Amino acid sequence: MLNYPNIDPVAFSLGPVEIRWYGISYVVGILLAWVYSRSLVRRYTDNVTLKNIDDFLIWATIGVVVGGRIGDAIFYMPAENYARFWEVLYIWRPGMSFHGGLVGVALATFFFCRSRKLPFLCLADIVSSAAPIGLFFGRIANFINAELVGRETDVSWAMVFPGAGPVARHPSQLYEAFLEGFLLFFGLMAIERLTKIRQERPGMMFGLFLVGYGLARILVENYREPEQHQGFLFLKVTMGQLLSAPVLIAGVAFIMYALRHKRA
């Protein structure tokens, strides 16, 4: 069994204001994703300019935060708390849903492209290629917060998380950081650099991201403790797996579309 590092979730304080690693991780993830998106545009623009990427940064941030907070409230908030649904506006509190954030960013991308007369799939390919960067830092923040812990296990790398009882558990946050973040990012990067898929098949990178995330999340949910107030929904299926199924299906649909629509 490994010792949990027990990192203080508060990075530093400015008077009465606490700056937490959770918030820092989102800022760093979004900024690095923005930098990487700019590098993708330099490699191949297809009507999406560096200024478009710069302008879209605030749209993406709003989509992630608003979508993530609302999604967390809808999918994971205990029923007895819905009377205080307005507390979703307390952005300083932990609680973000990837699936809600995905919908938020997808809508932000759609409306941004519509306002700038840009091809949706081309920007979606860029955004989805950079998204695993944010996912990686978000899962590391979950680990620091000792939240979204794994299920009980006796593997040699198990950890006892504070606030999760005396039993050793899977560090499932790190599993997700590796699969949804590190592995997915470098997999998409390799495809983008070694092939001409992004140039020839608009929507393919977006579809591959959705499939990659969906598979990774469904797999890791087998090692992650379900939300205490929800438990398993049916047949040992968790809410995360249920929400990831349509993500996986949508990814397959975008891949099939891209395969049938090659750019001349």
Image: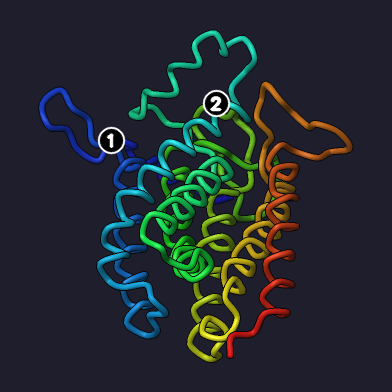
Q: How many marks?
A: 2
The crowd level at tag 1 (other Cα within 10 Å; few <14, some 14-19, many 20+) is: some
Which residue, given by chain and number where applicable, does mark 1 sit on? 10
Residue bearing mark 2: 73
Q: Nearer the viewer, mark 1 or mark 2?
A: 2
Displayed quadrant of residue 176: bottom right
Q: Residue at x 37, y 85 (%)?
A: 43
Classify 10 Å Cα crowding around label 2: few (below 14), some (14-19), many (20 and above).
many
Query: Where is residue 59 shown, x and y percent of the image?
Result: 35, 49
Q: Name the N-terminal-most of marks 1 and 2.
A: 1
Give the residue type at disc 1.
Val
Q: Position of residue 18 (x, y in %)?
A: 22, 30
x 60%, y 30%: residue: 166
Circle 2 SS class? helix
Q: Residue at image x 51%, y 36%?
A: 147
Residue situated in front as seen by the camera: 264 or 168: 264
Q: Does residue 57 lie above or below 16 as drawn?
A: below
* Callout 1: SS: strand
Q: Where in the figure is residue 70, as x and y percent of width and height?
A: 51, 30
**The one of 10 and 2 positioned closer to us in this rendering:** 10
Left or right, 29 with reference to 251: left
Disc number at residue 240? none
Residue type at mark 2: give it: Ala
Apparent side of residue 100 relative to residue 240 in the rendered image (left or right): left
State whether residue 63 is above or below residue 117. above
Instruction: Say how the picture is coloured.
Output: rainbow
